[in-house]
Image: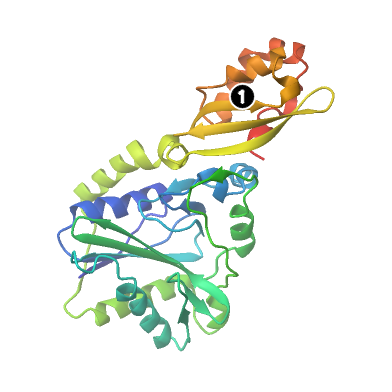
Amino acid sequence: MLIFYRPFTDPYLNIAAEEYFVKNATDDICMIWINEKSVIIGKHQNAYGEINYPYVSQNNIPVVRRISGGGAVYHDTGNVNFSFIRKTSKTNVVDFNRFTSVVVHFMQSLGLEVNINKRNSLFIGEQKFSGHAEHIFHDRVLHHGTILWNTDLTALANSLMPSKSYSSKAMESVRSEVCNLAPRLPGYPGIQQFTESLVNWLLAFYKGSTVYQLQENDLEAISALAETKYKTWQWNFGYSPAYSFSVQLPLRQGSAAVIVKVENGIIVGIETENELHRQPLAAMFQTMIGLTHREEDIDRFVKNNLDALELDGLNTVNFTKAFFR
């Protein structure tokens, strides 16, 4: 087992590193890492349906899609993450206990009594502090999870409070009351020491394990993957399963209710109320088909059609915002 602490806190690089190692490493690996503030969503989730988009946008919090399933999680520098990459067998592909039990043993070494729920999350009493997910690639399994040490729980709650309701077959997160570990270990020096203790404990737990140093070729490949995939809107938002949502578009007098349908991040349909069906405004809405469900695209549509939209009675000031909140 190769065990190491990943030195970067850029969420794009850290999530890219997991895909890189699960697809390229030949040894079993355990990586410990910390992200700057970010929201990490499961592969099969609707990004907009998992986040408070206005809050995330205003606070410049990146949203990054990972390759494993499961729910959305909030990361910051008070949260410690771990990634196990190990060979598996075709007869026992998914085995969360193989990895959750390791984290439980470490917590017990600190004097903490934890329990595992049916979704393989770790709890202290009724409060969750560690969520887990897995991804299988050929004969290798990526198992990763979080440990809330002293995360900003207010920012966590605000980030993961969806600002809009969506209809979709996407996997939705299961919300739980959460807690940090730091208040449970008042004599513990801090997150750096906690992280070092975890690394040292893992080195002792896995007999014959060694510390690994990232190589230049690792860093180059991870950076390239982050640029071409994990920093792209198409992967993080456009990859979402098909969804639809209702919008109250502001008119100079009242509002117009429409239903927007999105596939692969692209608006594929806009349904209007009966009373709008034959009005010029309804026809104008149809020209939005083909746009991405993205602020920049909708802002550009408003700018390019400003006179016509206003002539048809639309209040364009909050037009774009209506699609996201």
The local crowd at label 1, few if under 14, some if 14 to 19, many if 20 or more residues have their Cα within 10 Å, is some
Return the x and y of residue 44 as percentages of the image width and height.
Answer: 42, 49
Q: Residue furthest right?
A: 253
Query: Disc 1 residue type?
Result: Asp
For the residue pair 306 and 2, the one nearer the viewer reads as 306
Which of the 4 image quadrants contains residue 135? bottom left
Q: Which residue is drawn at 26% across and 62% down?
A: 141
Return the x and y of residue 216 as percentages of the image width and height.
Answer: 21, 49
Q: Which residue is drawn at 50% across and 56% down?
A: 72
Assign the N terminus to one quadrant of the image.
bottom left
Return the x and y of residue 268 as percentages of the image width and height.
Answer: 51, 27
For the residue pair 26 and 324, the one nearer the viewer reads as 324
Assign the C terminus to one quadrant of the image.
top right
Tell me, yes or no, if residue 11 can be seen here: yes
For the residue pair 293 and 113, the one nearer the viewer reads as 293
Q: Residue furthest front?
A: 274
- Please state if 304 lies on the left or on the right of 96 as rendered: right
Tell me, yes or no, if residue 316 can be seen here: no
For the residue pair 58 and 319, the one nearer the viewer reads as 319
Q: Is residue 102 above or below residue 90?
A: below
Q: Name the residue under label 1.
A: 299
Q: Is mark 1 on a helix, strand or loop?
A: helix
Q: Which residue is drawn at 19% across and 47% down?
A: 217
Return the x and y of residue 119 as percentages of the image width and height.
Answer: 45, 69
Colour convention: rainbow
How many numbered circles does the render carry?
1
